[in-house]
């Protein structure tokens, strides 16, 4: 039978504690952290001042029965509005359409944006002209671009409709969603490419050359070197585009006005706020959209992480 001395037990416990204890920050690391907090403080204060009151007031309105057509019937009803929205088929249908548009549009935009970033990164001649031309779709105001897409698909008038025997895709749910996705991809691919180009420029060329010397193919270099080192840039690009696409409003509003089963959660909130003048239900939908956006952001950050593989995550 073996025995364990108190000294050995104490030493083992101390070793385990030291192993799991967080490393102490050096003076330089603490100074950098203080500087970072000071630099972020003005922006945080402005954001809180600008957004805190509207958000709090929207939460308050979502807890009331508040219709501008019936000002005398205002009443605090707690979470009844949330129950009404979450039990409504209109909300779930709009959420389904929103998720479909977001997933498909962001996936296609990511692939095309990566291809565009690689082309812009490797362009040797007339680089400035090529990059400026590629960014033209993103520079066009979304409403103006949406009207151009609407006209292009108008039977007997639009050139795209003429190519498909005067087809009217905006009158069919599936085809209308396809046109909306096409307009989103055309408009936002340059933005995705610009963000990915910034991450692509940070990939060391020496690593690419070393891998090429070792016999790695172009696909192997892309998978094993480029993508891992671009992880933070991909996270930022995907996060921005997903949140922006989930809140899609202008393209749908101009192209279909939410008709034919193409309403998103944002257009549903707009209809309740400005058409039905129901501030209670409209504010509830806005808060639910805010919650969905927060969940998406959390999933992206936890799923992708923030540091690139091989980077120095320790503190100096």
Image (tube, helix red, strand yellow):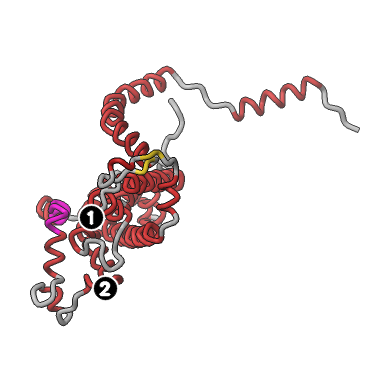
Earlier in the chain: of badge 2 and badge 1, it is 2
Please, is residue 121 above or below residue 11 in the view?
below
According to the image, label 1 marks what residue? Answer: 188
**Residue reaching furthest to the top:** 27
**Residue reaching furthest to the bottom:** 165
The answer to whether one can see residue 215 in this image is no
Left or right of residue 161: residue 175: right
- Of the pair 80 and 241, the residue shown nearer to us: 80
According to the image, label 2 marks what residue? Answer: 172
Q: Position of residue 238 (x, y in %)?
A: 33, 50
Question: Which corner quadrant of the image does residue 7 belong to?
Answer: top right
Q: Position of residue 236 (x, y in %)?
A: 33, 45
Q: For numbered disc 1, what is the local secondary structure?
A: helix
**Residue reaching furthest to the right:** 1
Mark 2 surroundings: few (<14), some (14-19) or many (≥20) residues within 10 A: some
Does 260 lie within the magenta span? no
Magenta stretch mostly in which secondary structure? helix
- Of the pair 18 and 44, the residue shown nearer to us: 44
Question: Which corner quadrant of the image does residue 178 belong to?
Answer: bottom left
For the N terminus, give its image quadrant: top right
The residue under the point 36% across, 36% down is 60
Q: Position of residue 35 (x, y in %)?
A: 33, 22
Residues shaded magenta = 135-145
The answer to whether one can see residue 20 in this image is yes
Q: Are marks 2 and 1 in contact (CB under 8 Å)?
A: no
Q: Position of residue 198 (x, y in %)?
A: 26, 45
The residue under the point 29% across, 64% down is 262
CA–CA distance in space, label 2 to label 1? 24 Å
Could you say which disc has been placed on residue 301 in the image? Answer: none
Which label sits in the foreground, 2 or 1?
2
For the C terminus, give its image quadrant: top left
């Amino acid at each position: 039978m073996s025995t364990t001395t108190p000294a050995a037990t104490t030493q083992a416990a101390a070793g385990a504690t030291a192993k799991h204890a967080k490393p102490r920050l050096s003076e330089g690391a603490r100074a950098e952290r203080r500087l970072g907090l000071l630099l972020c403080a003005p922006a945080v204060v402005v954001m809180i001042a600008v957004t805190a009151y509207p958000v709090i007031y929207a939460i308050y309105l979502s807890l009331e029965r508040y219709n501008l057509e019936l000002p005398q019937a205002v009443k605090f009803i707690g979470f009844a509005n949330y129950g009404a929205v979450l039990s409504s088929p209109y909300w779930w249908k709009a959420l389904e359409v929103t998720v479909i548009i977001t997933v498909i549009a962001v996936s296609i935009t990511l692939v095309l944006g990566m291809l565009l970033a690689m082309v812009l990164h490797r362009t040797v001649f007339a680089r400035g002209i090529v990059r400026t031309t590629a960014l033209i779709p993103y520079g066009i105001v979304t409403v103006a671009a949406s009207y151009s897409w609407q006209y292009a698909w108008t039977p007997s008038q639009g050139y795209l409709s003429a190519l498909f025997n005067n087809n009217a895709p905006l009158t069919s749910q599936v085809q209308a969603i396809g046109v909306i996705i096409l307009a989103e991809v055309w408009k936002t691919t340059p933005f995705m490419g610009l963000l990915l180009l910034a991450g692509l420029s940070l990939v060391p060329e020496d690593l690419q050359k070393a891998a090429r010397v070792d016999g790695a193919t172009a696909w192997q270099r892309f998978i094993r070197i480029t993508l891992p080192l671009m992880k933070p840039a991909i996270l930022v690009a995907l996060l921005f585009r997903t949140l922006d696409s989930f809140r899609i409003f202008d393209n749908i509003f101009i192209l279909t006005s939410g008709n034919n089963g193409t309403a998103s959660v944002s257009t549903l909130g707009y209809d309740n706020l400005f058409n039905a003048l129901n501030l209670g239900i409209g504010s509830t939908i806005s808060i639910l959209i805010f919650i969905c956006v927060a969940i998406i952001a959390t999933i992206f950050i936890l799923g992708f992480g923030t540091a690139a593989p091989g980077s120095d995550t320790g503190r100096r």
